[in-house]
């Protein structure tokens, strides 16, 4: 998602958009997304020190915070796309007590996948909604081993379109004046 965000900013800028226009967006409950990101950022530090059930509960709560913020802004362009992607990820994670990943299908690159946040689980025949798990490899030259879920792709698309819309719509409004 960081790549989608960076790409959207670069493309928006190339299209005459402005980063300052992103700051002008009135986005309700934006702080919930920041809080959720901070919670998720703490997981690598806690994974070996705190009971998994507590981390997992915090993970689900962080998704709930994001979902509340997205629902509060559902009328904004492309937010529904982001919400669908988040709901896809939340569903598969909640049903499997972690994000299932399918490393055996992708050889050595996938074997480098590290569950750094402790919230990935190997997929098995008991995995529910496995098609929503992490199974889409991002090949080299991408700098680190990465396997994405369909939900990750939907969130990235929505985020890219949302940022583009915010940056470029103001630029086109300026061009009409």
Image: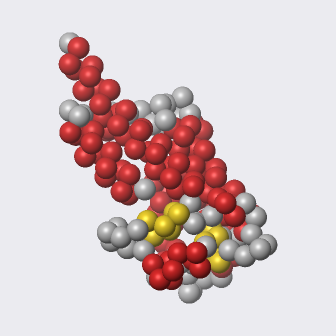
- Tell me the residue at 32%/26% (across/down): 169
Which quadrant holds residue 134? bottom right
Q: Is residue 166 left or right of residue 149?
A: left
Asked whether residue 21 is in view, the answer is no
Which image quarter is the N terminus in? Answer: bottom left
Image location of residue 174, percent across then percent down? 22, 20
Viewer-closest of 131 and 23: 131
In the foreground, 85 or 48: 85
In the image, farthest residue toward the top = 177
Q: Split into 4 quadrants, where in the image is the C terminus?
A: top left
Q: Is residue 89 above or below residue 159?
A: below
Q: Quadrant of residue 129?
A: bottom right
Q: Is residue 86 visible?
A: yes
Q: Position of residue 156 (x, y in %)?
A: 46, 50
The chosen color scheme is secondary structure
How far across and down, in percent of the image, does residue 50 sit?
A: 60, 82
């Amino acid at each position: 998602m960081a790549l989608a965000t960076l790409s959207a900013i670069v493309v928006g800028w190339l299209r005459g958009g402005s980063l300052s226009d992103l700051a002008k967006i009135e986005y309700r409950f934006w702080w919930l997304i920041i809080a959720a990101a901070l919670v998720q950022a703490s997981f690598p530090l806690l994974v070996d020190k705190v009971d998994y059930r507590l981390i997992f509960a915090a993970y689900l709560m962080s998704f709930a915070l994001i979902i509340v913020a997205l629902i509060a802004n559902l009328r904004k362009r492309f937010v529904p796309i982001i919400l669908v992607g988040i709901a896809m990820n939340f569903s598969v994670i909640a049903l499997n007590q972690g994000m299932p990943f399918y490393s055996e299908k992708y050889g050595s690159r996938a074997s480098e996948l590290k569950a750094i946040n402790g919230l990935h689980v190997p997929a098995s025949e008991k995995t529910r909604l496995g098609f929503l798990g992490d199974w889409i490899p991002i090949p080299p030259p991408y700098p680190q081993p990465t396997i994405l879920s369909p939900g990750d792709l939907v969130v990235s698309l929505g985020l890219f379109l949302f940022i583009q819309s915010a940056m470029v719509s103001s630029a086109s409004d300026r061009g009409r004046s």
